[in-house]
Amino acid sequence: MTTGLNFWDNDVWSFIVAITVLFAGMMVANSLRNIIKPLRTLMIPSSVLGGFLILIVGLIYKFATGKPIIQTQTLESLTYHGLGLGFVAMTLRKIEKRKDRKSRTGGFDSGVTIVATYLLQGILGLTVSITLNRLMGSFAASGLLLPMGYGQGPGQAYSWGRTYENLFNFVNGTSFGLTVAAMGFVSASFGGVVYLNLLRRKGKYSGEIGDFIKDEHLTADTITGKNEIPLSESMDKFTIQLALVFIAYILSFLFMKGIDMIIDTGVLGNFGYNTIRPLIWGFNFIFGTIFALLLKAVMSMLQKKGIVKREYMSNFLQNRIAGFMFDMMVVASIAAIDLSAFLLPDFIIPLTLLCVLGGVCTYLYLDYICKRVFPSYEHEAFLSLYGMLTGTASTGIILLREYDPKFTTMAADNLVLAQPWAILLGFPMLMMLSVAPQSLSKALVSLAIMSVLFIIMNLICFRRSLFGKKSKS
């Protein structure tokens, strides 16, 4: 009798099977989009459609066998880490510095707009959830999962839904957050199609919605930057890119673990356990971003000193890694939704109200603000920001590509340039995420603080018109 690992054991193959099922779901979804024109017209990403397909197939499989097709813990881990690793890969890209004032202003204005939209979604969400708490006993802070699901995407929706479920007894909080994120993609697709059709009626858009991309305009410079390491030496170039991503991510883990050890000493009391800990682990992507920036700075310093002779960061490959991580995050997050929660009134009623209000109000607010803050490319700004603030950055690019396939305006660059500003300006709101669920009174205080912050963000957005200067965005 052997007691070691056998190659035929289920544990040896379970993770490979899970990944294969996710890949298969996306491949089938992608084929369906190519074959069925209405699916292309809806512009729902293959990862989203694949997630719904796996969700349905998983329900049938579980009904027939009594076992899940993929363990929920595996799906949730992929969702959580997919966000952090994707942000690290995006951060490791080398972005050329822009010297013109217009470019810098566009990135800042986009960052302020993103934070203002987060706050709007948070205010709407808390207003709904606090009201329903008084009427039917719903979890008072569940509305804060609206900006996490719509504004931040599946990774943060899962992270904070799980936190609310484990620490603050929000029953089905994980599935609630993941469902909000899934409906965000539906809102992005629906709102994007509506906007493009309105532009068509005005004679400003003549393309075929969801049409195939005929030419990506790839060149040698696109694939390999100046002075980059060769594709294959003693270590493959793609392997090096993955290594850099995981090194930065594990450094962020060690940093968060160090803070967690301090919290475990009890020196910070309940503030450490109930506020700091969920903030630290809930925003793993922020710490991943910080350590990716530090890693870039170290590599740059080594290059300047002549210790490192070649450029190790590859924009092309880091884009591919980020795309893979986000696709995996999205398909896993939707497949992880627990459909049994939809049988509960205190789940489905707030969920419906939040998703409908979130989609409509985000659309109307961004339509209003883009006309005034980005007058020279209002349509491109709207499509990119609306797609990102209901889905992910990839969704924003999908919508933008429909109207501006060659990315002739600053809209696409703004999604990248806005991120540092969004993190900096949005930090006060992030604090509310771990404060609001502690009690109804703290939820009300959080709502008041977010309302004040929303006014401040709008004053910053409209600063030029308020001071009598025309926008140069």
Image: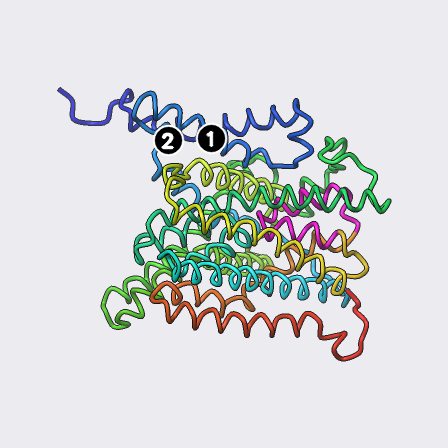
Coordinates of residue 471 in the picture (x, y in percent): 79, 69
Residue furthest right in the image: 203
Coordinates of residue 216 in the picture (x, y in percent): 74, 36
Residue on which disc 1 sits:
22
Q: Verify whether residue 80 appears in magenta.
A: no
- Extent of the magenta region: 380-408
Which disc is residue 70 wearing? 2
Residue furthest bottom in the image: 467
Residue drawn 58% across the image and 58% down it: 300
Placement of the N terminus among the 4 image quadrants:
top left
**Closer-to-camera residue (288/229):** 288
Residue drawn 39% across the image and 42% down it: 76
Sequence-wise, which precedes: disc 1 or disc 2? 1
- Quarter holding residue 9: top left
Asked if residue 84 lies left or right of residue 396, the reply is left
| Helix, strand or loop status at disc 2 | loop
Q: Verify whether residue 381 appears in magenta.
A: yes
